[in-house]
Structures are given as C-alpha cells and as structure tokens.
C-alpha cells in the first residue's frame, strides 16, 4: 500500500507541475484534498486535487474528473474569491465540507494560500453562534426526515430492498445534524455514519434518533414546527409596492377575424 501512496503522490506532483506550466500566471495554488490530505488514503482512494486560480483568468478553468494511470483524478477548480467565499460560508453540509479549508497538503503554494484560507475559515467558526449552528442543524434534520418518510412509505409498499438508498441518505443527513450540534467535522461519509452511531441504523432506530434530535433542537430554540403565517413569512420580505400597476396587454388580433370581414365585403361587391 505504501508503494501505491508514493505513486499517487508522484502523480499528484506531476499533474500540479503540468497545470502550473500550462496556465502559469492563472494558477495561485495547487494542493491535495480529501483522504490524501488526511493521510488515510489507500489503493482504492481517488486523487482529489484543489486548483486555486487567480482573478486574472479571462476564461475560467473548470473542474473535471478523469482517470490517469489507473487512478481516478478529481480536479476541483475555484478562484481565490470563490474559495474564500466558501470558507466564510457555513452550510448544513459543513461537517463534511469544512476539512477542505482546514486540512490540505500543498503541492504548489508560493503565496502561502492554504494558511490564508485556513485562517479565514477558523475566523468564521469563531464568529458563528450556537443559534446559527442550530439553524443549520434544523435544515439538515428536516432533509433527513424527508428521506426517512420516503423510506417508510417505500418500505410499506415494496419491502426493505427498495428502501436502502433512501435509508442511507436519511442516515447521512441525520449524522450531519449530530455534527452540527457538536461542531464536529467528519473526514468522509463513512466516518460520519460511524462516529454518529448510524452505520447500522434501521428505519426504526433512525426515526427514534431523529425524534431525540428534534427535542434537542427545540431546547436550543430551533424547533422544526411552524405555523402557516410563519412559513409564509420565512420566504422573505414582500416586494415594495411602488403604486404602479402593470397595464394589461392589448388583445392580439385574430388573423381569421381579419380575413373573414374582407371576404364578406368582396362577396357583397360580387353579388351587386
């Protein structure tokens, strides 16, 4: 396995060198993400490489997935501003996505970029309140409950075999809730399920866990229930009424109605 790691690391360095040589001024940094950055990769791991572009790109580069020398390579391409914007934004997927800003293995980093983006994300976490994380957890829980209810419906209709995908999705989203409430990051989906105690979750145990999380969110002021008016108001502020009203469009003439009067008029002339 060590030989495989060395080969993948060499491949990553070759790709970084080729990218920098090809686009030169357009590349700000290149680094390893995912399992290779964590150091727990194996012979089955793909190669996730983050490519940070400068603001000077007239034509933005795009993310791409290809297989190179038998290894699946995922190039994640974002500009400096995009990386920083995402590092300063928290989402319900944060337990799974946060590590990309905190744990990366630089390959090409002449400007100390990875230290900058790491500090930007840490600063965002320091500013985040428990209420904000509770709101993110509520969104994740509602998504989990949606998949759970679908899994329950399919279980009643067709049996367990047809519910596995829905059950996995529900378990993964439930694990996100646990991660958000404890501000815990996961290395990957398998790690999230294992550390949340959901790797072997059944439909019944998943519903029980979600009820527990629902009660915990209610204690934190982030209950999942809402009234009709609260739900409508959550859409945002209504547009400001300027007092103007759009004028109705004039009716479009029917070509048939225009032709028939002319035909009748011609018919009267002929009869005379």
Image (cartoon, rainbow, N blue to C red):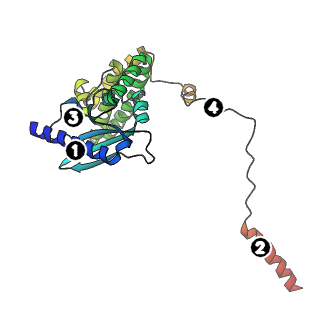
Q: Residues within 10 Å of mark 1 (few under 14, many from 20)?
A: few
Give the CA distance from mark 4 to mark 3. Answer: 48 Å
- Residue identifier under label 4: 238
Whether pointer 3 and pointer 1 mark residues with C-beta atoms closer than 8 Å, the reply is no
Give the CA distance from mark 4 to mark 1. Answer: 54 Å
Residue 59 visible in the current orientation = yes
Viewer-side label of 4, 3 = 3
> Mark number for residue 14?
1
Whether pointer 3 and pointer 2 mark residues with C-beta atoms closer than 8 Å, the reply is no
- Left/right of residue 8 with respect to residue 125 in the rendered view: left
Q: Is residue 256 above or below residue 17?
A: below
- Residue identifier under label 3: 36
Front in this rendered view, residue 29 or 83: 29
Q: Say which element carries label 3.
A: helix
Q: Position of residue 271 (x, y in %)?
A: 86, 85
| Quadrant holding the C terminus | bottom right
- Residue identifier under label 2: 260
Whether pointer 4 and pointer 1 mark residues with C-beta atoms closer than 8 Å, the reply is no
Front in this rendered view, residue 47 or 146: 47
Q: Is residue 190 above or below residue 126?
A: below
């Amino acid at each position: 396995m060590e030989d495989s790691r060395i080969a993948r690391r060499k491949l990553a360095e070759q790709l970084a060198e080729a990218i920098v040589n090809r686009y030169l001024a357009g590349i700000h940094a290149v680094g390893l993400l995912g399992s290779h950055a964590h150091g727990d990769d194996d012979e089955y791991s793909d190669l996730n490489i983050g490519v940070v572009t400068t603001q000077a790109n007239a034509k933005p580069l795009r993310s791409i997935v290809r297989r190179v020398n038998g290894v699946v390579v995922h190039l994640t391409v974002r500009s400096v501003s995009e990386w920083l914007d995402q590092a300063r934004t928290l989402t319900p997927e944060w337990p799974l996505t946060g590590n990309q800003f905190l744990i990366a293995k630089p390959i090409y980093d002449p400007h100390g970029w990875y230290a900058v983006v790491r500090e930007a994300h840490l600063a965002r976490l320091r500013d985040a309140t428990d209420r904000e994380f509770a709101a993110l957890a509520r969104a994740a829980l509602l998504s989990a409950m949606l998949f759970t209810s679908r899994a329950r419906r399919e279980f009643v209709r067709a049996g367990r075999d047809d519910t596995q995908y829905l059950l996995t999705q529900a378990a993964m989203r439930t694990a996100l809730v646990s991660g958000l409430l404890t501000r815990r990051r996961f290395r990957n989906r398998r790690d999230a399920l294992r550390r949340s105690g959901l790797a072997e979750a059944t439909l019944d145990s998943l519903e029980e866990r979600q009820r527990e999380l629902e009660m915990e969110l209610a204690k934190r002021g982030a209950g999942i229930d809402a009234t009709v008016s609260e739900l409508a108001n959550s859409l945002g502020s209504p547009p400001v009424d300027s007092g103007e009203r759009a004028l109705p469009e004039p009716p479009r003439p029917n070509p048939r109605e225009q032709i028939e009067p002319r035909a009748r008029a011609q018919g009267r002339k002929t009869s005379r």
